[in-house]
Image (spheres, helix red, strand yellow):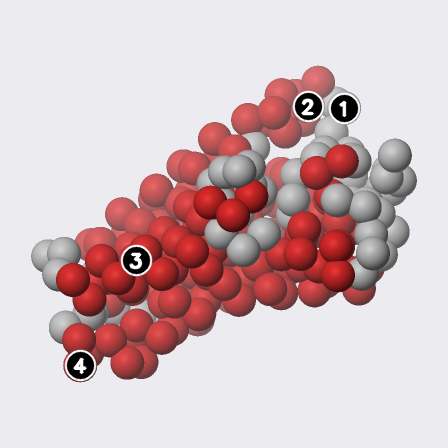
Amino acid sequence: MSFTLPSIIAIVASYLIGSLSFAVIVSKALGMADPRSYGSKNPGATNVLRSGNKGAALATLLLDALKGWVPVFLIHQFGAQWGLGGGVAAVAGVAAFLGHLYPVFFGFQGGKGVATAAGVLVGIAPWLGLATGATWLIIAIFFRYSSLSSLVAAFFAPAYYLIGGGIAWPLDRTALVAIIVMSLLLIWRHRENIRRLAAGTESKLGSKKKPT
């Protein structure tokens, strides 16, 4: 994949879109406490849920996923006229994901990127996103740990892409590398959760910790 001016513009724009921290934006719009001030202090949907406001958590989840999906979808739909293909779309998805992790608008202090990564996967291949999301849901239902669900889904996402490549969706080397990079970063961002899971102190889904 060669980097042309249109591809660079698309990737930078995707990072800026990803830098919109909707956990903070939604909470502020609803007059709620900053999610970085309570619970895990992570600006993501799971931590917003700890406030007790399920609507705010759902809005955060959907908007964070949307900002990962939109750049990939737009490049797939309209990028050909600018010489932008599936490889650029995948890299743009990673850029949006990195924007969520390290948002330029919020002091580079972002969330863990689960919802945004899910949006990117749906953009790359809807069935891939569905399979990965189903994996997350199954683990969440049985074990009630959001972090464990995310780790398992991150592990399986590249495997699903390889298994279904050439059958359910086209197999693209750049997209595979992009998915692996997101999975590794997701695991890295959950390193504290891994320690708490091992120690048996990780919070389960549905547990509330009110803002201070």
Mark 2 or mark 4, which has the lower sequence index? 4
Residue 196 shown left or right of residue 14 in the figure: right
Q: Which of the two discs, 1 and 3, labels the residue nearer the N terminus?
A: 3
Q: Position of residue 139 (x, y in %)?
A: 65, 47
Label 3 amino acid?
Answer: Ile
Residue highlighted by disc 2: 196
Q: Is residue 10 above or below residue 105?
A: below
User: Along the polypeptide, which appears first: circle 4 or circle 3?
Assistant: 3
Check disc 4 and report the residue beneath it: 81
Eye-nearest disc, 1 or 3: 3
Residue at position x 30%, y 58% in the image: 11
Q: Amino acid at mark 2?
A: Arg
Residue 195 appears in which quarter of the rendering? top right
Residues at marks 2 and 4, CA–CA distance in whole angstroms: 49 Å
Q: Secondary structure at mark 4?
A: helix
Mark 1 neighbour density, 10 Å: few (under 14) some (14–19) many (20 or more) = few
Q: Earlier in the sequence, mark 1 or mark 4?
A: 4
* Residue labelled with disc 1: 201
Towards the viewer: 99 or 206: 99
Distance from disc 1 to disc 3, alpha carbons, whole Å, reads: 39 Å
Task: Please tell me which residue lies in front, 81 or 85.
Answer: 81
Which residue in the protein does label 3 denote?
Answer: 11
Q: Nearer the viewer, residue 50 or 129?
A: 50
Camera-side residue: 159 or 80? 80
Viewer-side label of 1, 4: 4
Q: Earlier in the sequence, mark 3 or mark 2?
A: 3
Q: Are marks 2 and 4 in contact (CB under 8 Å)?
A: no
x 45%, y 66%: residue: 69
156 left or right of 48? left
Q: Which residue type does callout 4 highlight?
A: Gln
